[in-house]
Image (cartoon, grey):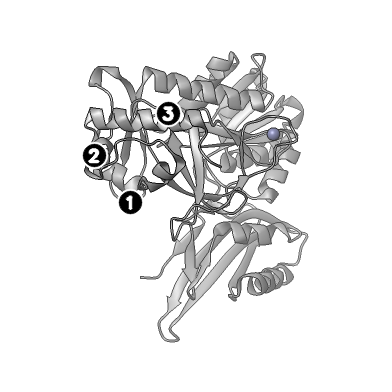
Amino acid sequence: MRLKEKQLEQVDAQIKRLIKSGSYFGKMYEEAGITGVSSQEDFEKIPFVDKGALRDAYPLGIQAVPDEEVVRIHSSSGTTGKPVIIPYTKKDVDDWATMFARCYETAGITDRDVVQITPAYGLWTAGIGFQAGCEKLGAMAVPMGPGNTDKQLQMMQDLKSTVICATSSYALLLAEEINRRGLKDNIYLKKGVIGSERWSDKKREYIARELGIELYDIYGLTEIYGPGIGVNCSEETGIHYWDDYIYIEIINPVTGEIVPDGEEGEIVITTLVKEGAPLIRFRTHDISRIIPEKCSCGRDWPRLDIIQGRSDDMFKVHGANMFPSQFEEILGMIDGVSSEYKIDIAHDDEKNRDIIMITVEAEGRVNFEKTAQTVRGLVKSRMSVTPNVVVVSIGTLPRSEKKTQRVFDHRD
Ligand code: ZN
């Protein structure tokens, strides 16, 4: 999808402002001789940036406005190395809330709803993003933050929450608890707004069925405002994103070449009106594709397909690239297994080969031995590796309130 005239002007203005500010990226463009853009071809010559650059600029090197204009910072937790700090102006904070309110509206949420927010508050962009959008919409926010399931369930019943905002893992945990405690009749939830993690269809169906709710996936990342730059509509055919705030390209993650609309690759985002820390051609490492057709809901906002995973979640076994989502798809095909799983990878030095072990959960009614065989057969035929499979009872694997780690690599 090419830049529209207005988007091109916005990018041009951002580059000029970055250079004037003398920020980290301003200097980078100046040194590269980039002074602005007047065509798609100019734009495509701008180098990509990634999280490494943001770490280099730690703490506030990417700030592109005077100190007095910054009203807040957020930080993305790096699992490795320095964190990244993103400064926001008043307008940035307001724009983000506007985008998030648009997500709620797309999900059919109104000012009559009671929105229980369980993502974490703090340096994260999670909780506060859900809250600001909720307030902008005019709905009632119940700012719980994560954890304390007893209290969550009590508030959910007493305040008659109609919307739950959560990670998919925590939504699953809540659904299982509501089921276990027999609280279904006291719960008024109609919708779930789920963020921050790729999740399987199986988990999705379980949560939707157990809670009797419609589910909406929020897309976003701290470097680009936070969650709320896109959401799926009730057609559930991809994520509408707000192209008056961001421009999206899909590239081949290996070669960096732009792929045609409809083809899968890495999402690269350019902010169009961000003040505190504009980013041009930021590599997200999220894998998806642009859906070229217009959505049957009638909305004109462009669409991304569901996020397939992260290029950094990719791991290699016997030299072959694998994504956790491929295992999720396989588990989704098998009767009686849950959406939870764990993958351990080790190296057998004696035989000089990688060993992959998959732990899956199954219901008591199915034969564990047979289920293990089915998993092994499907993984072998679809992914060309033969795993060891362990089947355990449902509820054995840890449920977490944050992003669940599923792949454990024990190789040196
Ligand atoms: Zn739609």
Q: Which residue is mark 1?
A: 80
Residue 291 is situated, as x and y percent measured from the top left of the image, at 64, 45
Give amino acid for label 1.
Thr
Residue 35 vs residue 96: left or right? left
SS for tag 3? helix
Residue 304 is situated, as x and y percent measured from the top left of the image, at 60, 42
Res 46 quadrant in image: top left
Q: For marks 1 and 2, give the CA distance.
A: 30 Å
Mark 3 or 1: the one toward you: 3
Q: For marks 3 and 1, give the CA distance.
A: 34 Å
Q: Residue at x 46, y 41 (%)?
A: 40
Res 239 quadrant in image: top right
Give amino acid for label 2.
Glu
Figure label count: 3
Mark 1 or 2: the one toward you: 2
Q: Residue at x 40, y 37 (%)?
A: 223
Q: Which residue is mark 3?
A: 10
Q: Which residue is mark 2?
A: 30
